[in-house]
Image (tube, rainbow, N blue to C red):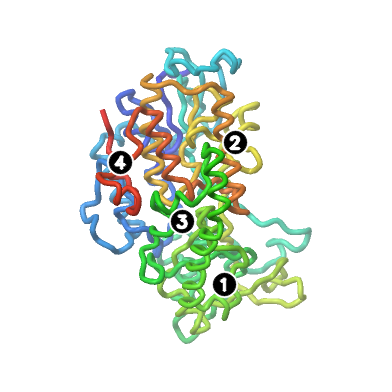
Amino acid sequence: MAIFSKIGVVGAGISGIAVAKQLRHHNPIIFEATDCLGGVWKHCSYKSTKLQTPRCDYEFADFPWAERDNTSFPSYEEILDYLYSYATHFGVFELIRFNSKVVEIKFVGNQDPEGNSDFGNLLNGRPMWEVAVQTDQSDHIQWYAFEFLVICTGKYGDIPNIPQFPPNKGPEVFKGQVLHSLDYCKLDEESSLELLQDKKVVVVGYKKSGIDLAVECAKANQGPKGQPCTMLVRTLHWTVPHYSVWGLPFYIFYSTRASQFLHERPNQGMLRNVFCKLISPVRKAMSKTIESYLLWKLPLEKYGLKPEHPFEEDYGSCQMAILPEEFFAEANKGMIQFKRPSKWWFWEGGVQFDDNTKLDADVVIYATGFDGKRKIKTILPEPFCSLIETEGMMPLYRGTIHPLIPNMAFLGFIESVANLHTAEIRSIWLSRLLDNRFKLPSIPKMLEQTQKEMEIMKKTTRFYKRSCISTFSINHTDEICEEMGWKSWRKTNWLSEAFSPYSSQDYQEEN
C-alpha cells in the first residue's frame, strides 16, 4: 500500500533543496538517491573544480555568504559547505530521505487535460502520482502517492553521454583504461593521481569538465617521467580567462537590463521586433569586442582553438567557460596538446584519426557530458515521457511547468548564467502557485509562451538545445514576478535598474 502525502520532490541538488525550503510548510518528502545533498557539486566535481562566477552571484536571497565580498571564486568544497549550512538553517535536512532512489513513476489521476485547463487548485487532496522508491540498493520497493510531484534530477550527472563506435573500433579493442568524467569524479585524490601520473592520457571534449581535467592531468605529470595530456576537440567554444573584458566587468555586456534590452525576448511586440533588427549591428559589435579581447589575451589561434561562431552564441547557450589560470601555461610547456579530428576511433594502443594517424594512449577519459532528459524518461510513464522534449528542448512554462503534464513541476532543466538564482525564484513561484495565490493561464496560452521562448533560443544560438535563457533572463524573471504579484523592477533607482546586474538579493521575498 502506498504512503500518501501532499508533495514529493525527486533530487536534493541545488533545485531540490531550493524548492524544499520554499515548500517546507507542506512538509514535502525529498528522495535523494545518494547519501548526501549537493547534486553535481558533490558527484561531478574534481578537486580543482571552482564556481565560474563570484560568490555573491551564487547565493540564496535570504542566506548570503559569510564572506560575500570575497572576490575569489569558491571551490566546490566551499559551495557544499554553503549548501549544507543553508539546508541546516532552514530545516531541509529533516525532509530528505537519503539513499532513496526513484525507479518508477505512475500516473493515477485524471488524465483528461481539458478537465484541468485552468489548473485550479493543484493540491486537491487526491493522489495524482505514485512513486516507487528503492532504498539502500536493496530489492525492497516502497510506493508513495502524492498530490503533486517536483522533478529536480537536473541535466548533469547519473547518465553519461558515451560516444558510439563501429564494430571493432570501440573501447573493447583498446588495451588501456577507458572511463567517463563521472567515474573520475568518484576517485579519491590518491586514486586519481595514480590514474594520471606518468600516463599518456587522452581527454575527449572541450567544455569546462574537459578543460579542468586536462589541467589536473598536466599537474600530475610534472615529474621527469611525465607525459602530455591530449585533448580531442570536435566542437570549439569560446573560453574566458577571467571576469572582465577590456577592463570592464563582464556583466556590462550581457547581464544588465540595458544590455538585455538590445536582445530579442518573448512577447516583445512589433515595435521591439523592428528595433531589435535595427540594433543587430550593436549586438554583433558587442560580441566582436569580446572576441577581439579573447584573441588578444589567449593563444586561441596559435593552438587552432578559435571558434568560427560568434561569442554571443556561446553566451546564449550558457557555454561560456572560465579557464583555470594554468591551462595555457601548461599548453605552452607542451603538457596539454590538442587534436581536432572530425572522426576518431580506438585501436589497441590508443586512438586513431580519420587521416590515418595514430596516438598512443594509456588512459582515455570521456568529458562528453550527460543525458539529463534520459534520466526523466527512464522513470516517467507514457504518454508524458514523450512530451518532455520538443526539438531537443524542454517546453516548460516559466521554466517549471509542462502545460500537458498535470500536477508535476521540473526544476533545473532550463539554464541561465546564474542557475541558483533561477532555481530559487522558480521555487518561490511554485510555492505561491501551490498555495493558490495565483492561477496558471490556460493550456493554450502556456504552450504559446513556451513556444515563443524556444523560438528566441533558436534565433540566438545554434546550440539552442541546451535550453538557455541567458540573453533574456531579466525579462524572464520580470514575468515570473508579475505573475506572482511582485514588482518586476527591483532596484532603488533608474540608474541601478539600467546598468547594474541583478542578483538573488534583489528578489528577497515579498509578503
Cβ–Cβ below 8 Å for labels 4 and 3? Answer: no
Q: Residue 440 carries which label?
A: none
Cβ–Cβ below 8 Å for labels 4 and 2? Answer: no
Q: Which of marks 3 and 1 precedes in the sequence?
A: 3
> Which quadrant would residue 339 be assigned to in this image?
bottom right
Quadrant for the C terminus in the image: top left
Indicate which label's residue lies in the foreground, 4 or 1.
4
Residue 300: image x %, image y %?
54, 75
Q: Name the residue under label 4.
A: 490
Q: Which of marks 1 and 2 precedes in the sequence?
A: 1
Closer to us: 477 or 269? 269
Amino acid at the residue labelled 3: Lys
Left or right: residue 105 compared with residue 44: right
Q: Name the residue under label 1.
A: 201
Q: How far apart are marks 2 and 3 (CA)?
A: 39 Å
Q: Which mark is residue 451?
A: 2
Amino acid at the residue labelled 4: Arg
Q: How far apart are marks 4 and 1 (CA)?
A: 50 Å
Q: Distance between the residues labelled 1 and 3?
A: 18 Å
Amino acid at the residue labelled 2: Gln
Q: Distance between the residues labelled 4 and 3?
A: 42 Å
Left or right: residue 259 compared with residue 370: left
Closer to us: 71 or 94? 71
Q: Which of marks 1 and 4 precedes in the sequence?
A: 1
Q: Name the residue under label 3.
A: 186
> Which quadrant would residue 475 be assigned to in this image?
top left
The residue located at (43%, 70%) in the rendering is: 241
Q: Element under label 1? A: strand
